[in-house]
Amino acid sequence: VIVTSGDWDYRELVLNWFLHVHQLKYYNALVLAMDSELTAEVSRRRLPVFDDSALLQGWNNTCLQRHIQQVRCERHIGVAALVAAGIDVLHSDATCIFLRDFVPSLQRQFGTIDLLVQRDEWPTGPVRTI
C-alpha cells in the first residue's frame, strides 16, 4: 500500500498526490487524514482514507503540543501498524509527485531491503546545536 498523510491545509497536495498515483495505475493508495475536514473531503471523492484525527488528539496530553509534531509522530505510528499487520508499505510525503512507475526501480536498486528512508533535515537548527 502507498500511504501519504495530511490535514485540511494540505488537501490540494493530497489530492494531487492521489491523481498522480492513480495515473500510474496504483490503486492501493491510502491517506492518513489528520483532521475530520480532510477525511470528509477525501471520502466525498470516494478515495481511500483513514480518519486519524481522534488518535491525533491523544497527543494533546503529551509534550508534543505543536500540531506538526503530533502529525509527524502519528503518521509513523500509522505506517508501523500497517507493517505490523504484514502489509508492505511505501510512505510518501504528499509533496512527492510520481511521474513514472517507480516500483521496478526500487526492486532493482534495493532488492530485499526492509526499510529505506530519506533523511529529513527539518528542522536543522536543533540538529546543528547537538
Image (cartoon, rainbow, N blue to C red):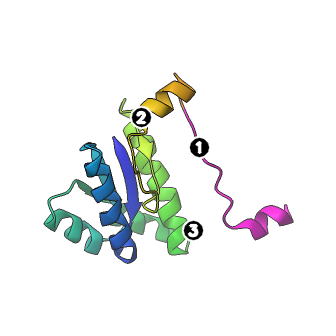
- Badge 2 or badge 1: first in the primary sequence: 2
Residue identifier under label 2: 103
- Near mark 1 (Cα within 10 A), the count class, few <14, some 14-19 or many ≥20, is few
Task: Measure how far apart labels 2 and 1 are at the Cα level.
Answer: 15 Å
Circle 2 residues within 10 Å: few <14, some 14–19, many ≥20: few
* Residue 41, placed above or below residue 48: below
Where residue 66 appears, x then y in whole percent? 55, 75
Which of the pair 78/23 is nearer the observer?
23
Amino acid bearing label 1: Val
Report the magenta residues as a range. Answer: 115-130
- Establish if 116 lies above or below 7: above
Residue 116 forms part of the magenta stretch? yes
Q: Is residue 54 magenta?
A: no
Q: Residue lying at the far right in this picture: please name it.
A: 129
Give the residue pinned by disc 1: 117
- Number of other residues with Cα within 10 Å of mark 3, as a class: few under 14, some 14 to 19, many 20 or more: few
Q: Locate residue 71, reporting x and y percent.
A: 47, 64
- The answer to whether residue 42 shows anywhere in this view is yes
SS at mark 1?
Answer: loop
The reply to whether residue 113 is visible in this rendering is: no
| Residue 112 point in image, percent of width and height | 52, 22
Q: Residue furthest bottom?
A: 9
Image quadrant containing the N terminus: top left
**In the image, is residue 46 above or below residue 82?**
below
Q: Amino acid at mark 3?
A: Leu
Q: Secondary structure at mark 2?
A: helix
Q: Amino acid at mark 2?
A: Val
Q: Looking at the image, is mark 3 or mark 2 nearer the viewer?
A: 2
**Disc 3: which residue:** 64
